[in-house]
Image: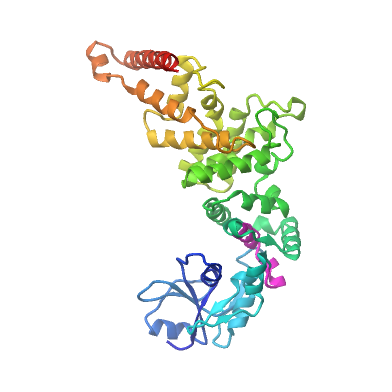
Amino acid sequence: MQGKVYLVGGAVRDALLGVPVYDHDWVVVGSTPQAMLEAGYEQVGKDFPVFLHPNTKEEYALARTERKSGVGYHGFEVSAAPDVSLEADLLRRDLTINAMAQAQDGTIIDPYGGQQDLQNRVLRHVSPAFAEDPLRVLRVARFAAKLADFGFELHPDTAELMTQMAHSGELDALTPERVWQEVVKALSCAQPSVFFKVLDRVGALAVLFPELARLKGVEQPVKHHPEGDAFIHTLMVLDASAELSDELAVRFAALVHDLGKGLTSPELWPKHHGHEAAGVPEVAKLCKRYRIPKKIQQLAEKVCEWHGLIHKGLDSEGQPSLKPKTYLKVLQACLAFKQRETFKQILLACMADARGRTGFEQASYPQYEFWLQLGEAAEQVNNREIIERGYQGAEIAEAIERKRLQRIADFVQAFKQKA
């Protein structure tokens, strides 16, 4: 294969930060698509020449330049001629810390000050061309979340540029799939709240996630929410969910669990009666807009609708406080009998909700085990025995429900006696 090969982007950045490197991206300078194919590489890029290594399957892209020619992040004219230099290729990248390369002898090529910005913990755009790609607003917010443990801050000029982009209408050109891809990556970070804080800072939150932006300034009862408004609470719940679970569905459910509070009339603040049910259509609207997978949507809707009653399963003294019928209603609605793992996910999101409050970050959440044990007790019904007793049709379901209600009542009674 003709040309020179350089390691680029995140692999160089992470190695310099001392972070484990899992993915490697390579740039080839001075080659052609034909030369790559003749060397056994498989072309996968349609908009620009990207190839898979015949053995490692890692991506090798020809050095290229881009020129804005339309709206959005597809509106670019790409040139991948053999005379495109490495510096020209790095110039089109988003952040200086992502615009470094490493030669095969280990030499770092850093024409735009990436190493200095790494040391200073600064996220700074490489060039004014940053503004040509609206996806970069999301990407920078995601890098802020990914690198949160290192304390990176947005450079003021980059924050100003992102703000201009958010107000320009360019974000409207983003496809639902690309937005969701960035959200998924952000939610996988240890501090996913940083992603949404950055979007809020630059005005992009209100454009892309108005349901979340609406929570800003919404008052809650100080006794239960010392942290302040519903947006602050939501971000704390999100980070609490990241500590409790690696599952995307749990973290997303935590993010949207209180959207209904954004609909409460200010004259009713700080109370939010009925916010649980009111939030479900808001969750559905957000999920439809970004074509979020149905399974994730369904879990989020259940957490949104039922988290209040799940909290009330035990009162402040740790005692059961609901009627057997209400317990059964929650168990059935949250799939405790059909999909036990889903029920556990719902309970984890509720635990995150309880801990996502100032002073409650490490609080115990006895409701988790209580609901699991209650579900197990209610499930111990011998359906065959009921059928053998002569029940038919709808009578069978009614008899099963009566038996479950009795088992719930017995469990609650035993729980109270044991406490």
Q: Which of 59/351 is in front? A: 351
Q: Give residue 238's position: percent from left, percent from top.
A: 57, 43
Q: Which of 61/345 is in front? A: 345
* 184 on left or right of 217: left
Quarter occupied by residue 96: bottom right
* 263 on left or right of 418: right
Determine whether 284 is above or below 117 in the image. Answer: above
Q: Which of 310/1 is in front? A: 310
Q: Residue furthest left?
A: 388
Quarter occupied by residue 166: bottom right
Q: Residue furthest front?
A: 419
Residue name at image x 40 percent, y 15 percent:
414
Residue name at image x 62 percent, y 43 percent:
235
Determine whether 419 is above or below 104 in the image. Answer: above
Q: Quadrant of the N terminus?
A: bottom left
Q: Does the stretch in magenta take in 126?
A: yes
Residue name at image x 66 percent, y 42 percent:
212
Q: In this view of the protein, can residue 151 be seen by the observer?
A: yes
Q: Looking at the image, what colour scheme do you see?
A: rainbow
Q: In this view of the protein, can residue 203 be seen by the observer?
A: no
Q: Residue furthest top?
A: 390
Q: Give residue 403's position: percent from left, percent from top.
A: 35, 14
What residue span does the magenta drawing correspond to? Answer: 125-144
- Tally of marks: 0
Q: Quadrant of the C terminus?
A: top left
Q: Give residue 203's position: percent from left, percent from top.
A: 73, 52
Q: Does the stretch in magenta take in 12?
A: no
Determine whether 407 is above or below 356 in the image. Answer: above
Q: Give residue 304's position: percent from left, percent from top.
A: 56, 33
Q: Which of 329/347 is in front? A: 347
Q: Main secondary structure of the magenta part?
A: helix
